[in-house]
Amino acid sequence: MKGLPKLPIGMGNFEEIITGGYAYVDKTSHLAEMACAGEYYFISRPRRFGKSLAISTLDALFSGREELFHGLSAENFFKRSDYWACPVISFDMSRISLKGGLAEFENGLKRQVVKNFERHSLVVSNAILESACSALDDLLRNLLDSIGPAVVLIDDYDSPILDLVRRGEDSSPARKAFMDLFGRISDVLHKLRFVLVTGVTKFSPLGDLSAMNRLEDISRDARYASMLGFTEDELTRYFAPHIDGAAESCAAIRSVMVESIRNYYGGYSFDGKSAVCNPFSTLSFLEEREFRGFWFDPASLSFLKDYIKAKGLTVEQFRGIDVSNDSISASGEIEHAPAVYLLYQIGCLTLRPGRAHEFTLDYPNREVRVALSSLFVTNILGSASESDESRRRLKRCLLDGDTKGVVAEFNRVIEAAPYDSLDRAARRAVRGLRLKIDAWEWLYSSTLLSYLIGMGLDVDSSLDSGGKAPNMVIKIPGRSWVIGLDIVKGCSEAGKAAESILKRLKESGPVGGYDEAVLLGLLIDDERKSITAFSSETDVSASGSAGGENEPGAELEEVPAPESG
């Protein structure tokens, strides 16, 4: 954008950002503190969250690139009496592929070892002909014997393994190769000045290496909770002109724009207290000035879609579940990890202050919740194209006030949901969330809620309303839809039952701030797995306007059972 600092979207090279005129959020105080305070670290963060940039910045710090830090918090790091420049060995595992098997992995690793030899003006060892790990032995020996303590930085250590997991392939041979690689570093760990390993997950290649157990896991350390990602203060301090531009494009004031960015791309917490925004999504929004999903790539979406279906997961079952620090920090094989652990590790769930345990889980923001809800709905409706068609039909009916059309779209999802597959998830949710409703009642409500969120709608909800309040409120321009549900097992007087839901909605009070509110009571028959009756009424006084010509209109209808056979 003309006149504004360039945005470093997806960039992980510290020197390129500093010398290229890009906006840079100064995280160097965290990195300098880490460099001074300890020796061997591991940190997990979701993909596209700034891990590579942190590795690149630490590389520059330890390599003595003082000229890159003028005006930054770590500028005085170079003036410490205990500072000295030292050799850095760096690996970026995201550049190593396992698509061609272990031979391709070995060749990729060899290329990175050779690059480190050349970086330090060393003759590439003949051991490279034997294996990359043998050559790494020679590299470490050369540097430690001739120069002294070295720094080892390993970025995205689990990237090749996660690629195998996404493709459903056996990762055990690759794990053995990883153990060999880390084992060579373990042998000289006591001679190294500093080690940092980053990844998305913490699983067995790290946990199985007893010689590497001196790595301190700082993934949930409060000192480094905001080291990656943007805090709200950083967002407004470093990107104020971009925020003002986005606010102007969206016809909003700055405070509203900041709140919208936080709601859509923020909410990530790695200690249950402080929160940060996803840097990739935030920068992408400031560049395009359009609220939509940026973080998920097609491969991730495809994996999650299949994973949700194979595991029989719902979207709402994880919100509010209490977890302990030990359970969320445990390492193991990611293929066999509980769903809640995998979703947290890859960034689909985040931490909130706990009740019974240290933490409570939730979705970090609207971007993630909409994406997962959309995948859940696509699985139910059978295809992305059918999901897109349903979205168009539903939004048109909501805007037009077409109650019958809205109910028809609701029923498509209610009738198509695989309840036998989802029953276990519903029971776990009701038990884990300590709800006072039956599992099947929660399942109908949560399925409909996920459908609405997956359709990109703004929805307030209460899945455990106790019959005293609306189950959900849909907010669209000029109108709100206030929806209540009751679930029965067969009902001879469905119409009257639907009317009682409408009465409950009226007694709950109007929804303010809209020209009109459509009150919609839905009766779902658990035997038919379908909406069998609905009652609706348009309340034109929702925003406080008087009656007169705008008298409320009521509608009651029983939905016939589908024809058999």
Image (cartoon, rainbow, N blue to C red):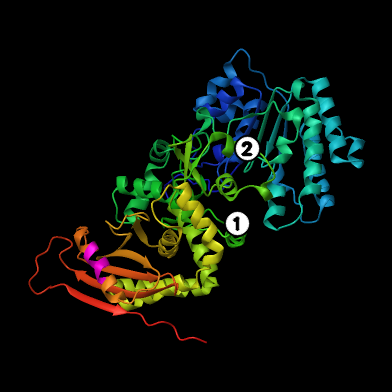
Above or below: residue 314 compared with residue 348: below
Q: For residue 326, what is the image quadrant?
A: top right
Q: Quadrant of residue 515?
A: bottom left
**Where are the magenta residues, as a range?**
499-504
- Along the horizontal axis of the image, is 456 left or right of 58? left
Residue that sits furthest to the left in the current view:
548
Give the residue number, with chain letter if any, for mark 2: 330
* Badge 2: residue crowd in 10 Å (few <14, some 14–19, many ≥20): few
Which quadrant of the structure image shows residue 539? bottom left
Q: What is the magenta segment's predominant secondary structure?
A: helix
Residue type marked 1? Ser
What residue is at 68 percent from the left and 47 percent from the top? 159
Asked whether 474 or 420 is in front, the reply is: 420
Q: Residue at x 54, y 33 (%)?
A: 220
Q: Position of residue 354 (x, y in %)?
A: 44, 37
**Mark 1 crowd level (few <14, some 14–19, many ≥20, 10 Å Cα):** few
How far from the left and from the top, in percent, is residue 498? 28, 71
Residue 151, horizontal then vertical, whole percent: 71, 27
The residue singled out by tag 1 in the image is 300
**Residue pushed farthest top?**
81
